[in-house]
Image (cartoon, rainbow, N blue to C red):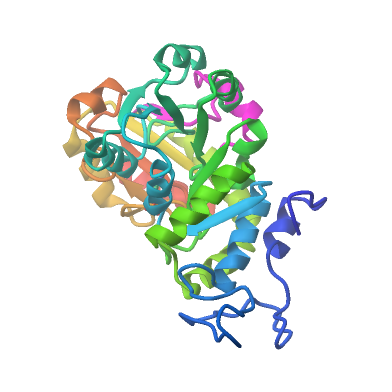
Amino acid sequence: MSKSSKYRFGTKAIHAGVEPDSATGAIMTPIYQTSTYVQSAPGQHRGYEYSRSQNPTRAALEKSIAALENAEFGFCFASGLAAIDAIIKTLKPGDEVVSTNDLYGGTYRIFTNIFKDFGIHFNFIGMQDAATIAQHITDKTKLIWVETPTNPMMNIIDIKAVSEIAKKRKVLLAVDNTFSTPYLQNPLELGADLVMHSITKYIGGHSDVIMGALATNDEQLAHRLKFIQNASGAVPGPQDCFLVLRGIKTLHLRMQRHCENGAAVANFLKSHPKVNKVFWPGFQTHPNHEIASGQMHDFGGMISFSLKENTKEAATEILKRFKLFTLAESLGGVESLSGHPATMTHASIPKAERDKIGLSDSLIRLSVGIEDIEDLIYDLKQALS
Ligand SMILES: *Cc1c(COP(=O)(O)O)cnc(C)c1O
Protein backbone atom coordinates (compact mmCIF):
# COMPACT_ATOMS: atom_id res chain seq x y z
CA MET A 1 0.00 0.00 0.00
CA SER A 2 1.80 3.10 -1.24
CA LYS A 3 1.47 6.85 -1.55
CA SER A 4 -1.09 6.47 -4.33
CA SER A 5 -3.22 4.25 -2.07
CA LYS A 6 -6.91 4.90 -2.56
CA TYR A 7 -7.64 3.78 0.97
CA ARG A 8 -8.78 6.08 3.72
CA PHE A 9 -6.88 6.77 6.93
CA GLY A 10 -8.27 4.02 9.18
CA THR A 11 -7.73 1.35 6.54
CA LYS A 12 -4.17 2.54 5.98
CA ALA A 13 -3.54 2.56 9.74
CA ILE A 14 -4.44 -1.12 9.88
CA HIS A 15 -2.91 -2.39 6.64
CA ALA A 16 -0.17 -0.08 5.35
CA GLY A 17 3.33 -1.58 5.33
CA VAL A 18 2.16 -4.89 6.76
CA GLU A 19 2.38 -7.91 4.45
CA PRO A 20 1.89 -11.49 5.65
CA ASP A 21 5.34 -12.88 6.51
CA SER A 22 6.77 -14.49 3.37
CA ALA A 23 8.28 -17.43 5.26
CA THR A 24 5.30 -18.46 7.41
CA GLY A 25 2.24 -16.44 6.45
CA ALA A 26 2.15 -14.84 9.92
CA ILE A 27 -0.38 -12.01 9.60
CA MET A 28 1.55 -9.80 12.01
CA THR A 29 5.02 -8.65 11.00
CA PRO A 30 7.39 -10.75 13.16
CA ILE A 31 9.94 -9.16 15.48
CA TYR A 32 13.11 -9.80 13.49
CA GLN A 33 15.38 -9.75 16.53
CA THR A 34 18.61 -10.15 14.62
CA SER A 35 21.67 -8.01 14.10
CA THR A 36 22.84 -9.63 10.88
CA TYR A 37 21.74 -11.74 7.90
CA VAL A 38 23.41 -14.69 6.20
CA GLN A 39 24.96 -14.05 2.79
CA SER A 40 25.17 -16.93 0.29
CA ALA A 41 28.34 -15.45 -1.21
CA PRO A 42 30.17 -12.19 -0.49
CA GLY A 43 27.76 -9.38 -1.30
CA GLN A 44 24.90 -11.76 -2.10
CA HIS A 45 22.02 -11.15 0.28
CA ARG A 46 18.24 -10.62 0.22
CA GLY A 47 18.27 -6.89 0.80
CA TYR A 48 19.23 -7.17 4.45
CA GLU A 49 22.88 -7.04 5.56
CA TYR A 50 23.05 -5.57 9.04
CA SER A 51 20.20 -4.28 11.23
CA ARG A 52 21.53 -0.74 11.61
CA SER A 53 21.13 -0.47 7.84
CA GLN A 54 17.94 -2.53 7.32
CA ASN A 55 15.58 -4.59 9.46
CA PRO A 56 12.30 -6.10 8.21
CA THR A 57 10.26 -5.07 11.27
CA ARG A 58 11.53 -1.51 10.97
CA ALA A 59 10.96 -1.56 7.20
CA ALA A 60 7.27 -2.44 7.75
CA LEU A 61 6.90 0.43 10.22
CA GLU A 62 8.67 2.89 7.93
CA LYS A 63 6.25 1.99 5.13
CA SER A 64 3.31 2.42 7.47
CA ILE A 65 4.47 5.87 8.64
CA ALA A 66 5.11 6.97 5.04
CA ALA A 67 1.60 5.82 4.02
CA LEU A 68 -0.04 7.70 6.89
CA GLU A 69 1.69 10.93 5.85
CA ASN A 70 1.03 10.29 2.13
CA ALA A 71 4.79 10.21 1.64
CA GLU A 72 7.08 8.20 -0.61
CA PHE A 73 9.78 7.74 2.03
CA GLY A 74 9.67 7.08 5.78
CA PHE A 75 12.51 6.65 8.30
CA CYS A 76 12.41 5.64 11.93
CA PHE A 77 14.86 6.73 14.61
CA ALA A 78 15.65 5.78 18.18
CA SER A 79 13.78 8.88 19.43
CA GLY A 80 12.07 12.00 18.17
CA LEU A 81 15.22 13.93 19.01
CA ALA A 82 17.34 11.48 17.02
CA ALA A 83 15.07 12.24 14.05
CA ILE A 84 15.60 15.99 14.58
CA ASP A 85 19.34 15.35 14.95
CA ALA A 86 19.32 13.67 11.51
CA ILE A 87 17.55 16.65 9.92
CA ILE A 88 20.03 19.19 11.30
CA LYS A 89 22.92 16.97 10.17
CA THR A 90 21.86 17.63 6.57
CA LEU A 91 23.07 21.23 7.20
CA LYS A 92 26.58 22.69 7.22
CA PRO A 93 28.42 25.24 9.38
CA GLY A 94 27.25 28.73 8.46
CA ASP A 95 23.74 27.59 7.55
CA GLU A 96 20.81 29.30 9.23
CA VAL A 97 17.54 27.90 10.54
CA VAL A 98 14.43 29.97 11.18
CA SER A 99 12.46 28.25 13.92
CA THR A 100 9.23 28.71 15.84
CA ASN A 101 9.99 30.36 19.19
CA ASP A 102 7.39 28.36 21.09
CA LEU A 103 8.55 24.79 20.71
CA TYR A 104 9.32 21.51 22.42
CA GLY A 105 12.02 22.13 25.03
CA GLY A 106 14.21 19.27 23.83
CA THR A 107 14.21 20.65 20.30
CA TYR A 108 15.28 24.05 21.63
CA ARG A 109 18.01 22.32 23.66
CA ILE A 110 19.51 20.32 20.77
CA PHE A 111 19.42 23.41 18.53
CA THR A 112 21.03 25.80 21.01
CA ASN A 113 23.22 23.54 23.17
CA ILE A 114 24.55 21.19 20.52
CA PHE A 115 24.20 22.40 16.94
CA LYS A 116 24.94 26.05 17.68
CA ASP A 117 28.47 24.91 18.60
CA PHE A 118 28.78 23.33 15.16
CA GLY A 119 28.29 26.71 13.51
CA ILE A 120 24.60 26.46 12.68
CA HIS A 121 22.63 29.57 13.53
CA PHE A 122 19.09 29.39 14.89
CA ASN A 123 16.70 32.30 14.76
CA PHE A 124 13.64 31.81 17.00
CA ILE A 125 10.63 33.85 15.96
CA GLY A 126 6.86 34.02 16.44
CA MET A 127 5.17 32.53 13.38
CA GLN A 128 1.48 33.10 14.08
CA ASP A 129 1.60 35.71 11.33
CA ALA A 130 3.32 33.74 8.55
CA ALA A 131 4.01 36.89 6.49
CA THR A 132 6.57 38.08 9.04
CA ILE A 133 8.78 35.02 8.41
CA ALA A 134 10.08 36.28 5.07
CA GLN A 135 12.02 39.12 6.71
CA HIS A 136 14.05 36.63 8.77
CA ILE A 137 15.21 34.61 5.77
CA THR A 138 18.71 35.38 4.51
CA ASP A 139 20.92 33.87 1.77
CA LYS A 140 22.18 31.48 4.42
CA THR A 141 18.79 30.21 5.56
CA LYS A 142 18.44 26.55 4.61
CA LEU A 143 15.58 25.38 6.82
CA ILE A 144 12.37 26.63 8.39
CA TRP A 145 11.34 24.67 11.48
CA VAL A 146 7.67 24.69 12.39
CA GLU A 147 5.80 23.06 15.23
CA THR A 148 2.00 23.39 15.12
CA PRO A 149 0.06 23.36 17.34
CA THR A 150 2.93 24.69 19.41
CA ASN A 151 3.95 23.22 22.72
CA PRO A 152 2.64 24.24 25.22
CA MET A 153 0.92 27.46 24.10
CA MET A 154 -1.21 25.76 21.42
CA ASN A 155 -0.53 28.47 18.86
CA ILE A 156 -1.32 27.58 15.27
CA ILE A 157 1.02 28.22 12.37
CA ASP A 158 -0.32 28.36 8.81
CA ILE A 159 1.70 25.58 7.15
CA LYS A 160 0.50 26.41 3.64
CA ALA A 161 1.39 30.10 3.97
CA VAL A 162 4.84 29.24 5.37
CA SER A 163 5.42 26.70 2.59
CA GLU A 164 4.72 29.34 -0.04
CA ILE A 165 7.38 31.59 1.49
CA ALA A 166 9.78 28.64 1.79
CA LYS A 167 9.31 27.67 -1.86
CA LYS A 168 9.78 31.23 -3.09
CA ARG A 169 13.05 31.53 -1.14
CA LYS A 170 14.16 27.94 -1.90
CA VAL A 171 14.35 27.00 1.76
CA LEU A 172 13.28 23.61 3.09
CA LEU A 173 10.27 23.48 5.40
CA ALA A 174 10.16 20.84 8.14
CA VAL A 175 7.12 20.41 10.38
CA ASP A 176 7.10 18.68 13.76
CA ASN A 177 3.70 16.99 13.50
CA THR A 178 3.85 15.23 16.89
CA PHE A 179 0.88 17.04 18.47
CA SER A 180 -1.40 16.62 15.46
CA THR A 181 -0.45 13.14 14.26
CA PRO A 182 -1.11 12.25 10.61
CA TYR A 183 -4.75 11.66 11.58
CA LEU A 184 -5.30 15.38 12.16
CA GLN A 185 -2.85 17.04 9.82
CA ASN A 186 -0.67 16.13 6.81
CA PRO A 187 2.02 18.80 6.39
CA LEU A 188 3.37 17.37 3.12
CA GLU A 189 -0.05 17.92 1.51
CA LEU A 190 0.14 21.52 2.72
CA GLY A 191 3.50 22.08 1.00
CA ALA A 192 6.07 21.07 3.65
CA ASP A 193 9.16 19.17 2.46
CA LEU A 194 9.65 17.08 5.56
CA VAL A 195 7.50 15.93 8.45
CA MET A 196 8.87 14.80 11.80
CA HIS A 197 7.17 12.81 14.57
CA SER A 198 7.97 11.86 18.09
CA ILE A 199 6.37 8.42 17.77
CA THR A 200 6.76 8.22 21.55
CA LYS A 201 3.55 10.25 21.80
CA TYR A 202 0.29 9.63 19.90
CA ILE A 203 1.54 7.31 17.15
CA GLY A 204 2.94 4.79 19.64
CA GLY A 205 0.08 5.83 21.88
CA HIS A 206 0.62 3.48 24.82
CA SER A 207 3.46 5.19 26.71
CA ASP A 208 5.75 2.20 26.24
CA VAL A 209 8.18 3.22 23.48
CA ILE A 210 10.64 6.03 22.69
CA MET A 211 10.92 6.54 18.93
CA GLY A 212 10.93 9.14 16.18
CA ALA A 213 10.18 9.27 12.47
CA LEU A 214 10.63 11.37 9.35
CA ALA A 215 8.63 11.30 6.12
CA THR A 216 9.23 13.08 2.83
CA ASN A 217 8.51 12.99 -0.89
CA ASP A 218 11.84 14.65 -1.75
CA GLU A 219 14.02 11.88 -3.16
CA GLN A 220 17.32 13.70 -2.73
CA LEU A 221 16.53 14.58 0.87
CA ALA A 222 15.37 11.00 1.50
CA HIS A 223 18.69 9.71 0.21
CA ARG A 224 20.63 11.95 2.56
CA LEU A 225 18.42 11.07 5.55
CA LYS A 226 18.75 7.36 4.85
CA PHE A 227 22.52 7.83 4.71
CA ILE A 228 22.55 9.70 8.03
CA GLN A 229 20.21 7.15 9.64
CA ASN A 230 22.72 4.41 8.85
CA ALA A 231 25.92 6.42 9.30
CA SER A 232 24.93 7.97 12.65
CA GLY A 233 23.12 4.81 13.73
CA ALA A 234 20.29 6.11 15.93
CA VAL A 235 17.88 3.38 14.85
CA PRO A 236 15.06 1.80 16.88
CA GLY A 237 15.11 -1.89 17.77
CA PRO A 238 12.71 -4.40 16.17
CA GLN A 239 10.72 -5.03 19.36
CA ASP A 240 9.90 -1.34 19.65
CA CYS A 241 8.98 -1.23 15.96
CA PHE A 242 6.56 -4.11 16.55
CA LEU A 243 4.91 -2.29 19.46
CA VAL A 244 4.44 0.81 17.31
CA LEU A 245 3.03 -1.23 14.40
CA ARG A 246 0.50 -2.58 16.88
CA GLY A 247 -0.25 0.88 18.27
CA ILE A 248 -0.84 2.38 14.83
CA LYS A 249 -3.69 -0.03 14.15
CA THR A 250 -5.91 1.96 16.53
CA LEU A 251 -4.48 5.43 15.86
CA HIS A 252 -7.67 6.66 14.18
CA LEU A 253 -9.93 5.34 16.97
CA ARG A 254 -7.71 6.73 19.70
CA MET A 255 -7.45 10.12 18.02
CA GLN A 256 -11.20 10.35 17.56
CA ARG A 257 -11.66 9.87 21.32
CA HIS A 258 -8.73 12.16 22.23
CA CYS A 259 -10.45 14.90 20.20
CA GLU A 260 -13.91 14.32 21.74
CA ASN A 261 -12.53 14.27 25.28
CA GLY A 262 -10.25 17.24 24.53
CA ALA A 263 -13.20 19.37 23.44
CA ALA A 264 -15.19 18.46 26.55
CA VAL A 265 -12.26 19.23 28.88
CA ALA A 266 -11.48 22.54 27.14
CA ASN A 267 -15.09 23.67 27.49
CA PHE A 268 -15.26 22.62 31.13
CA LEU A 269 -12.08 24.52 32.00
CA LYS A 270 -13.19 27.62 30.12
CA SER A 271 -16.16 28.10 32.43
CA HIS A 272 -14.28 27.34 35.67
CA PRO A 273 -13.90 30.35 38.02
CA LYS A 274 -10.29 29.50 39.02
CA VAL A 275 -9.10 29.29 35.43
CA ASN A 276 -7.63 32.37 33.79
CA LYS A 277 -7.19 31.25 30.21
CA VAL A 278 -7.56 28.01 28.24
CA PHE A 279 -5.28 27.48 25.25
CA TRP A 280 -6.98 25.18 22.72
CA PRO A 281 -7.33 25.80 18.98
CA GLY A 282 -10.91 24.52 18.88
CA PHE A 283 -12.27 27.72 20.46
CA GLN A 284 -13.65 30.21 17.95
CA THR A 285 -11.92 32.88 20.01
CA HIS A 286 -8.48 31.26 19.45
CA PRO A 287 -6.52 33.78 17.35
CA ASN A 288 -5.80 31.24 14.60
CA HIS A 289 -8.96 29.12 14.88
CA GLU A 290 -9.71 29.60 11.17
CA ILE A 291 -6.30 28.32 10.12
CA ALA A 292 -6.58 25.38 12.52
CA SER A 293 -9.98 24.48 11.07
CA GLY A 294 -8.52 24.63 7.57
CA GLN A 295 -5.39 22.56 8.08
CA MET A 296 -6.48 20.15 10.83
CA HIS A 297 -9.32 17.62 10.69
CA ASP A 298 -10.07 18.18 14.38
CA PHE A 299 -8.37 19.89 17.35
CA GLY A 300 -6.67 17.10 19.27
CA GLY A 301 -6.35 16.31 22.95
CA MET A 302 -3.65 18.76 24.05
CA ILE A 303 -4.81 21.66 26.21
CA SER A 304 -2.97 24.20 28.35
CA PHE A 305 -4.53 26.51 30.92
CA SER A 306 -3.37 29.19 33.30
CA LEU A 307 -4.81 30.07 36.69
CA LYS A 308 -6.17 33.35 38.03
CA GLU A 309 -3.73 32.87 40.89
CA ASN A 310 -0.70 32.97 38.65
CA THR A 311 1.89 31.16 40.77
CA LYS A 312 3.82 27.95 40.55
CA GLU A 313 2.45 27.03 44.01
CA ALA A 314 -1.18 27.27 42.87
CA ALA A 315 -0.42 25.04 39.87
CA THR A 316 1.49 22.57 42.06
CA GLU A 317 -1.47 22.26 44.43
CA ILE A 318 -3.77 21.24 41.57
CA LEU A 319 -1.21 18.92 39.98
CA LYS A 320 -0.78 17.11 43.29
CA ARG A 321 -4.55 16.61 43.63
CA PHE A 322 -5.11 14.98 40.24
CA LYS A 323 -5.99 11.29 40.44
CA LEU A 324 -6.43 10.47 36.74
CA PHE A 325 -4.41 13.27 35.13
CA THR A 326 -1.14 11.73 36.31
CA LEU A 327 1.75 14.14 36.68
CA ALA A 328 4.39 13.03 34.19
CA GLU A 329 6.47 14.17 31.23
CA SER A 330 5.25 13.08 27.81
CA LEU A 331 1.84 13.09 26.17
CA GLY A 332 -0.31 11.31 23.62
CA GLY A 333 -0.82 8.04 25.48
CA VAL A 334 -4.19 6.43 26.16
CA GLU A 335 -3.99 7.64 29.76
CA SER A 336 -4.47 11.28 30.71
CA LEU A 337 -1.37 13.13 31.86
CA SER A 338 -0.68 16.54 33.34
CA GLY A 339 2.46 18.59 33.38
CA HIS A 340 3.94 21.88 34.54
CA PRO A 341 5.88 23.18 31.51
CA ALA A 342 7.82 25.87 33.42
CA THR A 343 9.52 23.27 35.65
CA MET A 344 9.24 20.15 33.47
CA THR A 345 9.24 20.03 29.66
CA HIS A 346 10.26 23.67 29.20
CA ALA A 347 12.67 24.14 32.10
CA SER A 348 15.56 24.27 29.61
CA ILE A 349 14.06 27.43 28.08
CA PRO A 350 15.21 30.53 30.02
CA LYS A 351 12.48 32.26 32.06
CA ALA A 352 12.81 35.46 30.02
CA GLU A 353 12.10 33.46 26.84
CA ARG A 354 9.20 31.67 28.54
CA ASP A 355 7.63 34.95 29.64
CA LYS A 356 7.93 36.33 26.10
CA ILE A 357 5.66 33.60 24.74
CA GLY A 358 3.19 33.71 27.62
CA LEU A 359 4.34 30.49 29.28
CA SER A 360 3.42 31.59 32.78
CA ASP A 361 4.34 29.95 36.08
CA SER A 362 0.77 28.72 36.66
CA LEU A 363 0.45 27.14 33.22
CA ILE A 364 -0.70 23.51 33.35
CA ARG A 365 -0.58 21.31 30.28
CA LEU A 366 -2.99 18.40 29.87
CA SER A 367 -2.74 15.46 27.54
CA VAL A 368 -6.35 14.33 27.58
CA GLY A 369 -6.52 10.56 27.33
CA ILE A 370 -9.25 8.23 26.13
CA GLU A 371 -10.83 7.37 29.50
CA ASP A 372 -14.55 7.97 30.11
CA ILE A 373 -15.12 11.70 29.93
CA GLU A 374 -17.34 11.80 33.05
CA ASP A 375 -14.44 10.51 35.13
CA LEU A 376 -12.01 13.01 33.61
CA ILE A 377 -14.32 15.94 34.31
CA TYR A 378 -14.83 14.70 37.86
CA ASP A 379 -11.05 14.59 38.35
CA LEU A 380 -10.68 18.17 37.12
CA LYS A 381 -13.55 19.33 39.35
CA GLN A 382 -12.08 17.82 42.49
CA ALA A 383 -8.53 19.01 41.75
CA LEU A 384 -9.67 22.59 41.08
CA SER A 385 -12.13 22.75 44.00
C1 LIG B 1 8.43 14.54 22.69
C2 LIG B 1 8.59 15.49 21.58
C3 LIG B 1 9.76 15.54 20.83
C4 LIG B 1 10.96 14.67 21.13
O1 LIG B 1 10.68 13.32 20.93
P1 LIG B 1 11.36 12.14 21.83
O2 LIG B 1 10.72 10.92 21.26
O3 LIG B 1 11.04 12.40 23.24
O4 LIG B 1 12.83 12.21 21.56
C5 LIG B 1 9.81 16.46 19.79
N1 LIG B 1 8.78 17.28 19.51
C6 LIG B 1 7.64 17.25 20.22
C7 LIG B 1 6.53 18.18 19.86
C8 LIG B 1 7.50 16.36 21.28
O5 LIG B 1 6.37 16.36 22.00
Q: The N terminus appears in which quarter of the rendering?
A: bottom right
Residue 223, percent across and down? 56, 50
**Can you name the residue that lies furthest to the front here?**
42
Region in magenta:
276-299
Residue 21, percent across and down? 70, 80
Residue at x 58%, y 18% (from the top left corner): 168
Q: Is residue 337 left or right of residue 327?
A: right
Compared to 307, does 113 lie above or below? below
238 vs 256, nearest the viewer: 238
Query: Does the magenta portion include 277?
Result: yes
Residue 283 seen in the current view: yes
Residue 205, percent across and down? 50, 59
Disc count in the image?
Answer: 0
Residue 142, percent across and down? 44, 29
Residue at x 74%, y 55% (from the top left corner): 2
Q: Is residue 334 left or right of residue 106?
A: right
Compared to 146, does 319 lie above or below? below
Residue 271 seen in the current view: no
Q: The C terminus appears in which quarter of the rendering?
A: top left
Residue at x 37%, y 50% (from the top left corner): 81
Compared to 204, does 361 lie above or below? above
41 vs 121, nearest the viewer: 41
Compared to 148, does 62 lie above or below? below
Q: Is residue 216 left or right of residue 23?
A: left
Quadrant of the rendered structure where residue 101 is? top left
Query: Does the magenta portion include 340?
Result: no
